[in-house]
Image (cartoon, rainbow, N blue to C red):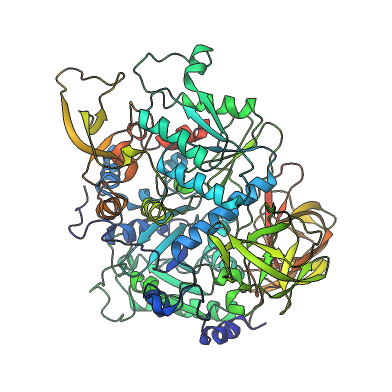
Amino acid sequence: MPTQPSSPPAGGPELGADTMDLLRFATIGSVDDGKSTLIGRLLFDTRQLFDDQLDALSDAADRRGLDEVDLSFVTDGLRAEREQGITIDVAYRYAATPHRKFVIADCPGHVQYTSNMATGASTADLVLALVDATSGLREQSRRHICISALLGVDQLVVCANKMDLVGWDKSAYQGIVDDMQTLARRLGIHSCTVIPISALHGDNVVERSDAAPWYDGPTVLDALESAQAGGWASQHGLRQGNGGRLPVQWVLRQPGGGRSYAGMVNGGPFRTGDPVIVLPQGQFTTVRSIETADGPRSRAEVGLSVSVQLADDLDISRGDLISSLEEPPTVTDTFEATVCWFHDRPLVAGDRLKLKHTTRVTPVVVERVEGIFDVNALEMTEADELAENDIGLVHLRTATPLALDSYTVDRITGSFVLIDDLTIATVAAGMVGRPSIHS
Amino acid sequence: MDTAESIATTRARPSVGPNPGRSAQSGASVTALVRPFGHPLGHLDLLESLAIFIIREVAAESERPVLLFSGGKDSAVLLHLAAKAFAPGKMPFPVLHVDTGHNFPEVLEYRDAQVATEGARLLVAKVQDSIDQGRVANPGPVASRNRLQTTTLLDAINANKFDAAFGGARRDEDKARAKERVLSFRDSFGQWDPKRQRPELWQLYQGSVRPGEHLRAFPLSDFTELDIWQYIRRERIALPSIYYAHERRVIERDRMLLAESEWVQPQGDETVEVATVRYRTVGDATLTGAVRSTAATVEDIIREVSASRISERGATRGDDRFSETSMEDRKREGYF
């Protein structure tokens, strides 16, 4: 039975009032680096675990004959995960401190579950990477850090875990710092902090540890509380200073006649009276009104679900995109893209699939596979097929022209998934453009 | 493009201008103005907006969607969001209640009134019919019908050829739910395979199914219990009266307070007491426990939930107590 945390109670007075900001982060690392243990520790030490959850953990430990509660059981919820002691799929957890709210995506480390890891990282503001200090940075962790950087996550907190097993040796820590700083610079990761911790014992997770007097940086919680929380702004291209984009989801008929176009605002805010262009058709008009169920608005912020009426009666349907005239997306049916391939059958030129981009699904053909991204050398090597979990550069041609932005500009209009026609499974995640790597 | 540099440059700019909709003089927006790198939308606005986005995506991509409604607070929020997603039009799908027959009368009254208020069409699938037709074994008049609901639900989905069912499940409720995608694929037997979930990146919700298969869609995935209550407060959503403190005859059994009813009577040395209680969840009346509480208003409840040391399902749901993975096991069979 773990020592029950005393006061304050879980939650606390009005934690998570709607004026608080929200940090979404994903945890990554190789098998056995201790990710789930770290999340369990973070939740335990910030008093986010309820009494009945703690009791369930104690019961589980008793049944397995363990002396100590296994904090990784907090997130490893599936039967197979508990049996094998591994994480198979992303577990989402919710936490709040008096400073901010957190959505945590605890991602699996096994290579065969890379698609699940990418699922968790695709909506993250920050990645928390675990590295085992007894073995250093492994290829799998490198791969996951590369994937999160390609996905546009530019804040990285690295936990050099199991420092207790190397006697809190500063040189083991320093080796990881050197590796990570090189990797972060080449991948264009804006901020990288390395913290020596022991997730099992809680050193430098929430409580500062005496074990490493040579370390005077932040604890894991300090780093999470001081990181830039974009909410969803960064995922909607807001920081790039683009104009607004509204991928049309649904056409609403207005009671008095006329139509409005429902969707979520992306790229930049819309205002009534804004001149806009409808893509891919290329028709010009202006925003007549912006509506929500709560009434009309003069301005629609990025991330808001709205419906807009336009000044002219145009033929617009689901999948079309309403864009401001300020730097609109490019309309094209051929483009190059970086893809993570998740299918056990390789991707080759000539493959025919479906592609979902914003709210449009269209047939697509792979014109050419250009290369595979080598996560060790951080460069593209020539290849004519992508195997499962490879990241590569491909040239695609779609049946319908798409209104595209480069992924580095906008995560919404620059991303797509590929769908296998036969199994209707999602088989790839795609990002418009080439990965940006620094020499 | 030099990503690091361009991000550094954009960061130096103020992220957004002042919002004319919320003037600085109103007082309430002071916090918003001092947020260091804030988004002009609050956390509840973002949760609402994403839920509406998901509802519209699924409605657009499926042929015959349906919204599952239990009369509980989460399904009340879900129904409200579905109505908002298509306003000023009507929501383009019906609402389905799977009725165990073990109901709190207040919840049935509420169900009919609320579905009418939100302008929806109600369908009811009864577990009693599944028992009468021999689809499930009759467990006896007083036993829980929680697990039997799965058959009734799947039969209703098949009979109506529904290819997408919206549910009000949240990821903070349970370990298995924490693992589930927003769009969760079910095979032609209604089963969930947690080891073969579709990748679900960004906001690209991929909802294709083949005949006989269906999706479960969970637009409230990222809401916590506290978010739900704050949203109910903000939107003034009506709830069944049993969510608020009231006096009730209860029996303490297996660390839960069960309402005395035609199905729940004292056994052995159990006694009936009159207690001031409220419900944190609404389910089968034979399994859903009340909690001792004097919280009579939404404000009181938000205060209570903030300080709670017991999780929502742990406090009130007998159905989750059978094993460490009881929710996963039920979900694999096709449960909500």
| Residue B103 sits above or below residue A314 on the image | above
Q: Nearer the viewer, residue B249 or B320?
A: B249
Q: Nearer the viewer, residue B281 or A84?
A: B281
Q: Is residue B55 visible?
A: yes
Q: Position of residue A17 (x, y in %)?
A: 36, 63
Q: Nearer the viewer, residue A180 or B75?
A: B75
Badge count: 0
Q: Residue at x 65, y 46 (%)?
A: B59
Q: Residue A312 lies in what quarter of the image?
A: bottom right
Q: Would residue B144 appear left or right of A234 to someone viewing this image? A: left
Q: Is residue B182 visible?
A: no
Q: Residue at x 60, y 57 (%)?
A: B201
| Residue A55 sits above or below residue B3 on the image | above
| Residue B185 sits above or below residue A159 on the image | above
Q: Would residue A275 appear left or right of B152 to someone viewing this image? A: right
Q: Residue B284 lies in what quarter of the image?
A: top left
The quadrant the C terminus of chain A occupies is bottom right
Q: Position of residue B30 (x, y in %)?
A: 38, 77
Q: Residue at x 46, y 73 (%)?
A: B22
Q: Position of residue A99 (x, y in %)?
A: 33, 70
Q: Position of residue A424 (x, y in %)?
A: 71, 44
